[in-house]
Image: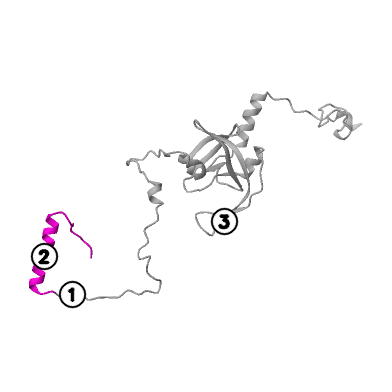
Amino acid sequence: MPCFQRSCQLCSKKGHFATVCKSGRPTVNAVDSEVADVIKTKCISAASPSSLSKATVPIMINELHAEAVIDTGSSVSFINKTLGQNMNLKMRPHKQAISLASLSHISFVEGITYATINLDKHRYSNQPLLFVNNLCADVILGHDLLKSHKTLEFNFGGSRDSLKICVMEASVSPVSLFTNLSPNIKPIAIKSRRYTKIDEEFIRGEVSKLLKDGVIEPSNSP
């Protein structure tokens, strides 16, 4: 019979077809637990694009490796939804719309989780992470985590001196002028008063005395 010369695709033995093979399905060889952990760790991380390498740092999320982008322009922290599911992070219901650099581009939060993050020598317990699809990196760390530190330093390797920006000063709102005026008040124009020659000489002399005594300072106002 033809089957005598055929090899089974399941057990590789001759004499029968795979459809009538009585051998058990091939089993996957056991892998050493340490090797399995390494493989799992490497497979979980989706990393971030090379253009963000200067702001990308390695982190641990619940003892699993990932790559995080330090984003000083983000008020909260995010995690790629696929990565979070692969890490078996518990996702709680949370709906929120996020405006990106352009207001016409909006992403939606799928849920929220709370995890322990290790970054360098620092540990952040119960750190909230928002689930977002198709994130540009494994994790984005925003102000909710960064604000616990006094300063944040990036080394870009440039030739210029360090650029320091005081966030506290930059966030101060400008002083509102003429807050006591009603919105319908219109400005009026008053012509300059004309002085006699004697009055002008007297005023000029008094101003010079005040300048000399340091009571007033020269002004370059238009």
State the residue at coordinates (34%, 41%).
Answer: 162
x and y, in percent, of residue 123 in the image: 53, 33
Q: CA distance from mark 2 to mark 3?
A: 63 Å
Q: Which mark is residue 11?
A: none
In the rendering, at what x and y percent does residue 126 appear? 59, 38
Q: Quick one: quadrant of the C terminus? A: bottom left
Marks 2/3 in contact by CB < 8 Å: the verdict is: no
Disc on the earlier residue, 2 or 1: 1
Mark 3 neighbour density, 10 Å: few (under 14) some (14–19) many (20 or more): few
Q: Quadrant of residue 59?
A: top right
Residue 162 can be seen in this image: yes
* Magenta stretch, residue numbers: 195-222
Q: Nearer the viewer, mark 3 or mark 1?
A: 1
Q: Position of residue 82 (x, y in %)?
A: 64, 43
Q: Secondary structure at mark 1?
A: loop
Is the residue marked by circle 2 packed among few (<14), some (14-19), or many (20+) residues within 10 Å? few
In the image, is 79 to the left or to the right of 201?
Answer: right
Among numbered discs 3 and 1, the one appearing first in the sequence: 3
Q: Magenta segment: does it hold 205?
A: yes
Label 1 crowding class (10 Å Cα cut-off): few <14, some 14-19, many 20+? few
On residue 106, the disc is 3
Q: Which residue appears at 63% of the width and 30% of the height?
A: 39
Q: What amino acid is labelled 2 in the image?
A: Arg
Residue under label 1, please give it: 193
Is 138 located above or below residue 184 in the figure?
Answer: above
Q: Amino acid at mark 1?
A: Arg
Residue 48, position as x, y percentages in the image? 54, 41
Secondary structure type for disc 2: helix
> Disc 2 marks which residue?
204
